[in-house]
Image (spheres, rainbow, N blue to C red):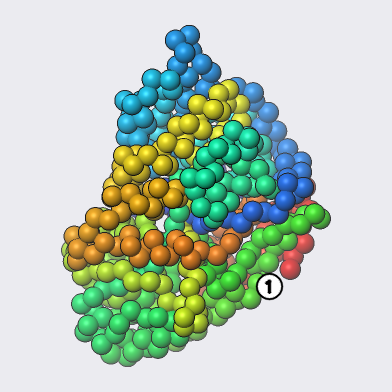
Amino acid sequence: MLASEQYCSEINTQEQSCGQTRTASPSIRRNRSMAKTRIPTRLLAAAAVLPLLTGVAACGLGGSGGDGAVKAGGTAEVTFWGWAPGYEEAAAQFNATHTDVRVKFEKIVSGSKGGYAKIFAAVKAGNAPCLAQVGYESLPSFVVEGAVQDVSGEAGKYQSGFGEGAWNSVKVGGQVYGIPVDMGPMALYYRTDLYAQYGLKPQATWEEFAADAAKVHSANPNGYLSVFNPDDPWWFAGMSAQAGGGWFGTDSKGWKVSLAGDPGTAKVAAYWQGLINKGQVKSEQGFSPDLYKDLQDGTLAAYPGPVWFSSILEQNAAQASGKWAVAPMPQWQDGTKSVGNDGGSSTAVVKGCKNTAAALQFANWMSTDAAAVGTLVDKAGIYPASTSGASAPALAKPSAYFGNQPIFDVFKQSAAQAPKWSWGPTMTQTSSDLTDAFGAAVAAHGDLTAALGTVQNKTVEAMKAKGLTVTAG
């Protein structure tokens, strides 16, 4: 809900995380998470672009195995690999209510911990599963490596159950490669007790947020309004999307990379750089014991984060129960409505699956069935990608941890305000490079904007090394 997965060249030391799986992360998100779980991805152009993605068989993933064949009794067996909490229970629920398809769920480590490497190796060996959990940010890489298969024809009948943004998340070059599971809409987590202490209210704009950051640190030199995590590129991507940014694009000539030249991304980098330089936000590693301590003991009063972070808080800042609440994300301009995503995963059809109809039947069921969605909400803290899932009873429950607030009401609004966004084909390396560059910049009192330039150059080099046509812009 995911970064060192340099597909092919580093196939055995895959990515980060989405994500997430991060410490105690429940997210289906990034693939270091879940997860990194995710972001609604943009339709990467048109079907004409697909050769740009699939024309490079850099890893030679040529296996033709897979499962999903119909057994003698007329029952199709589908093997499903994943790691998110709730997946195994959902598969059991499906098997208890269906006789035509039987799902065999096998838990693997998260994509960031080697799960993706395992999938790639299985495809090459011809013994891959029919379905696998794949974060949206990693799906283009799976397409480039030939590890998933186009199911546009058979999956089309399920499209009406998902909004445009969610469905575009499983499309690359106009082709469909699976079924969306969840999205990672963002919101503002804040401490009600500390906001009252400092005389604050949930900020409507980032300008107000910066002013309040100065106010909090002035009132309490040991306290901060919020934090910047240099090792969380997926969060930074969500923030950039909200600001109108875009890192990757395609046209008939190839790929365009614009981490350094994108105005929205530059705005976000300059904003947080200013707060860091003034010492008005804290800088520390994300999903770390230090962060959890600060979220629990009152050092931090707010955290802009994705929906799945609610479970992170509950698990790692238990003593702050009843003190946290959720509000809409601050906006860059008062009155606008744009909220990025941080995470999201698909159930992708792996190359070699012999019964895509059965595989898609289960994948769609897991994303739309009320009981299955309820299980994933309860176990993983997801926000469902399906339109029916958005009305799931589990999302209406008040949360005791958040002062009996029905927090998913806020995330439902955020999910409807997500801008378009595209991921690139080397996101594991890109995310790893962002983590390294941002970490070095913060540690050495450097510049986040300059770090983006470094990462852009490395990303362009990595894409060219795969034989892709790419320009920097």
Instruction: Judge whether residue 397 can be spotted in this image.
Output: yes
In screen coordinates, is 153 left or right of 203? Answer: right
Instruction: Judge whether residue 16 can be spotted in this image.
Output: no
Q: Residue at x 58, y 71 (%)?
A: 244
Vertical placement of 167 versus 288: above or below? above
Total residue callouts: 1
Q: Quadrant of residue 58?
A: top right
Q: Nearer the viewer, residue 339 or 337?
A: 337
Residue 230: percent from the left, percent from the top?
48, 67
Vertical placement of 59 versus 295: above or below? above
Vertical placement of 95 versus 13: above or below? above
In screen coordinates, is 137 left or right of 262? Answer: left
Q: Residue at x 70, y 33 (%)?
A: 60
Q: Nearer the viewer, residue 252 or 15?
A: 252
In screen coordinates, is 86 left or right of 249? Answer: left
The residue that disc 1 covers is 261
Quarter of the image that includes the C terminus: bottom right
Residue at far right of view: 253
Amino acid type, label 1: Gly
Q: Secondary structure at mark 1?
A: loop
Q: Residue at x 43, y 65 (%)?
A: 414
Residue 348: percent from the left, percent from the top?
54, 38
Residue 219: percent from the left, percent from the top?
28, 90
Q: Nearer the viewer, residue 430 or 157?
A: 157
Q: Residue at x 62, y 66 (%)?
A: 246
User: Dot 1, how many residues are within 10 Å of its Cα: few (below 14), some (14-19), or many (20+)?
Assistant: some
Residue 408: percent from the left, percent from the top?
33, 60
